[in-house]
């Protein structure tokens, strides 16, 4: 569509605007042959969206019936989709010696570059489960955005946001959430919010 001077910003709402232009037969900016091709693409997108919605309903239904998934959802930054993915992927949390081991398996721990007895931590390894890592980081970003707008009662998170760039803070929170998820799966508990200690 950009070839005909029709552009939109990135994001799903803007795609809707482009679809409305395709559907508007009175809009003369798109030649008839190009409109026919674009209508085919629009139908494919619509079909894909219906299919995704159907799968999401199935995932939500499974989540409601799974005890582990429901317990994981009590953690801020872990919703039904992330909880169900973790519960389905990690059927035996005892294969990991600790929560850090599970976070490393997902790829949320920094690479270590050690030389001459000095440890240097680099970027996260990204060598684990890409889908779980993406879900956990996306959930952490959501928590951080909310905390920046409305504040947070969690002193650890408040300090993290105050001293680290947003993306780095999101990865750190995702790492923490992975370790919390391991503890919930291993010890069968629910997330308890940290209490603020006042002097």
Image (cartoon, rainbow, N blue to C red):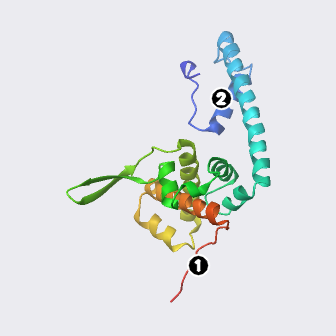
- Total marks shown come to 2
- Residue labelled with disc 1: 195
- Residue labelled with disc 2: 18
What is the distance, in whole Å, between disc 2 and disc 1 at their CAs? Answer: 48 Å
> As displayed, is residue 60 above or below residue 21?
below
Left or right of 147: which side holds 114? left
Q: Nearer the viewer, residue 177 or 25?
A: 177
Q: Residue furthest left?
A: 116
Q: Which mark is residue 161?
A: none
Q: Nearer the viewer, residue 139 or 122?
A: 122
Q: Nearer the viewer, residue 87 or 44?
A: 87
Mark 2 nearby-residue class (10 Å; few <14, some 14–19, many ≥20) = some
Find numbered disc 2 in the image and state the secondary structure of the residue it sits on.
Answer: helix
Q: Residue drawn 58% across and 25% down?
A: 6
Find numbered disc 1 in the image and state the secondary structure of the residue it sits on.
Answer: loop
Q: Residue drawn 45% across and 43% down?
A: 127
Q: Residue drawn 48% across and 59% down?
A: 100
Q: Is residue 174 visible?
A: yes
Disc 2 vs disc 1: which is toward the camera? Answer: 1
Q: Quadrant of the N terminus?
A: top right
Q: Nearer the viewer, residue 137 or 15?
A: 137
């Amino acid at each position: 569509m950009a070839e005909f001077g029709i552009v939109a910003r990135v994001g799903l709402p803007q795609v809707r605007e482009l679809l409305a232009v395709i559907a508007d037969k009175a809009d003369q900016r798109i030649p008839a042959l190009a409109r026919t091709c674009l209508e085919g693409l629009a139908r494919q997108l619509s079909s894909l969206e219906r299919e995704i919605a159907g799968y999401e309903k199935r995932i939500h239904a499974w989540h409601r019936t799974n005890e582990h998934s429901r317990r994981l959802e009590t953690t801020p930054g872990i919703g039904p989709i992330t909880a169900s993915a973790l519960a389905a992927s990690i059927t035996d949390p005892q294969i990991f010696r600790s929560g850090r081991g599970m976070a490393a398996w997902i790829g949320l721990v920094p690479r270590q570059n050690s030389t001459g007895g000095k440890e240097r931590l680099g970027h996260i390894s990204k060598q684990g489960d890409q889908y779980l890592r993406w879900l956990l980081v996306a959930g952490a970003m959501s928590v951080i955005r909310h905390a920046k707008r409305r504040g947070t009662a969690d002193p650890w998170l408040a300090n993290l946001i105050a001293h680290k760039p947003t993306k780095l803070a999101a990865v750190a929170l995702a790492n923490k959430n992975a370790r919390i998820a391991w503890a919930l799966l291993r010890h069968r508990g629910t997330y308890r919010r940290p209490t603020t200690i006042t002097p």
